[in-house]
Image (spheres, helix red, strand yellow):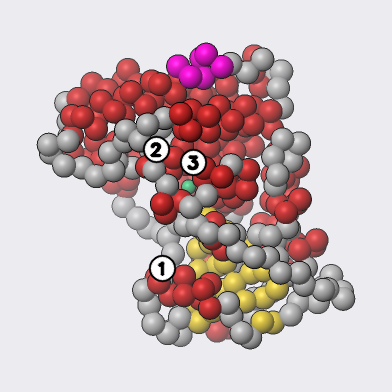
């Protein structure tokens, strides 16, 4: 996830089904893909879509000359199921957040050589691996959609809180909180604390990846009691480099203890979920976390060194504990 605001231009649409091919690509947009993937011979094809029909305003296919993509005539309909998904997500959260149905500026890009989806804030674009969307054997909403809602959660965060803009320059703790919140939008949507972990595991299986990553996946499991602070700290204090890297220096997993806490206190707690809407719960947690971040000193570590290891582990503990205490003091009523 990277960042800067792009001016959205207005396109007049005669028919909702008319899609204009754009021959002259936005230079910066193209450069981002080339830079991101560091490949020559990249082909970029952009199709504009009537936003009121699709919930996104254009799609882009980025492919390589030797790939099979030349056979694919991409149309907005190819990713229509994603637009339908985003409309449903909007309807869950729109009472409390500015979402895409009110902004209408989102783009979708499909990239051939990409393992993971991400949200590029400066282009207002969800960037998604092509194989997850277009290829039939992989076209499984159960695998793909939780990850898409996580990325869309980044979109919601940047559209509603300035602290999450400019991801590339943001403090580590802000990025870590952004990853936590993006997960929360997906977990609440599905009422399933394991949904992110399942989605990561299944999409990795599709790519025939090895499973050294299981620890990283379980760090995203909100229901996993091994993620609670009291369980993690003895392991971190005994200090295996790989484990410390996984929790203390990875922004996706930094707030794993918070995930377990939030599942018990909010997201999986019937006293809360029966009383409040998903939008209200998400808004309360987002607002409190943003308040917490704005008051927080930048006491995080971004890179492992043997000499700072102990200090970084104790800062990790403090940040997770402080955030829990802040939420305890400011409950949802
Ligand atoms: Zn993310």
- Classified by dominant secondary structure, the portion drawn in magenta counts as helix
Give the residue at x 87% y 76%.
Answer: 14
Residue on which the image places disc 2 = 173
The Cα atoms of the two marked residues, 1 and 3, are separated by 21 Å
Depicted 126 relative to depicted 241: above or below = below
Ligand 1 contact, mark 3 (Cβ < 8 Å):
yes
| Label 1 Cα neighbours within 10 Å, binned few <14 / some 14-19 / many ≥20 | few
Residue on which the image places disc 3 = 178
226 in magenta: no
Q: Residue 175: image x %, image y %?
A: 43, 43
Secondary structure under tag 3 reads helix
Whether residue 20 is visible:
yes
Give the residue at x 59% y 80%.
Answer: 25
User: In the rendered structure, which segment of residues is drawn in magenta?
Assistant: 325-330
Query: Left or right: 242 with respect to 110?
Result: left
Query: Left or right: 275 with respect to 27?
Result: right
Residue at the farthest right position: 14
Depicted 303 relative to depicted 69: above or below = above
| Label 3 Cα neighbours within 10 Å, binned few <14 / some 14-19 / many ≥20 | many
The Cα atoms of the two marked residues, 2 and 3, are separated by 8 Å
Q: Residue 312: image x %, image y %?
A: 24, 32
Q: Quadrant of the C terminus?
A: top right
């Amino acid at each position: 996830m990277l960042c800067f605001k792009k001016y959205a231009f207005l396109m007049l649409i005669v028919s909702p089904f008319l899609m204009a091919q754009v021959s002259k690509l936005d230079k910066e947009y193209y450069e981002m893909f080339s830079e991101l993937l560091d490949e020559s011979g990249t082909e970029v094809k952009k199709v504009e879509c009537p936003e009121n029909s699709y919930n996104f305003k254009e799609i882009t296919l980025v492919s390589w000359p030797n790939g099979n993509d030349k056979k694919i005539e991409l149309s907005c309909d190819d990713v229509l199921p994603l637009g339908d998904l985003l409309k449903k997500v909007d309807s869950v959260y729109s009472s409390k957040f500015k979402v895409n149905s009110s902004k209408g500026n989102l783009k979708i890009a499909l990239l051939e050589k990409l393992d993971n989806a991400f949200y590029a804030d400066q282009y207002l674009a969800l960037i998604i691996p092509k194989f997850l969307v277009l290829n039939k054997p992989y076209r499984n909403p159960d695998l793909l959609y939780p990850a898409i809602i996580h990325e869309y959660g980044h979109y919601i965060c940047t559209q509603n809180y300035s602290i999450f803009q400019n991801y590339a320059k943001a403090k580590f703790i802000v990025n870590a909180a952004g990853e936590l919140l993006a997960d929360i939008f997906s977990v609440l949507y599905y009422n399933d604390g394991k949904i992110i972990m399942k989605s990561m595991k299944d999409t990795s299986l599709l790519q025939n990846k090895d499973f050294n990553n299981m620890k990283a996946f379980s760090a995203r499991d909100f229901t996993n009691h091994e993620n609670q602070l009291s369980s993690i700290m003895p392991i971190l204090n005994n200090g295996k480099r790989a484990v410390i890297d996984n929790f203390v220096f990875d922004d996706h997993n930094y707030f794993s203890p918070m995930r377990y806490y939030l599942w018990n206190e909010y997201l999986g707690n019937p006293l809360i979920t029966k009383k409040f809407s998903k939008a209200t719960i998400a808004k309360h947690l987002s607002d409190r976390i943003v308040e917490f971040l704005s008051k927080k000193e930048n006491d995080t570590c971004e890179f492992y060194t043997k000499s700072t290891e102990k200090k970084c582990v104790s800062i990790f503990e403090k940040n997770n504990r402080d955030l829990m205490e802040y939420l305890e003091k400011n409950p949802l009523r």
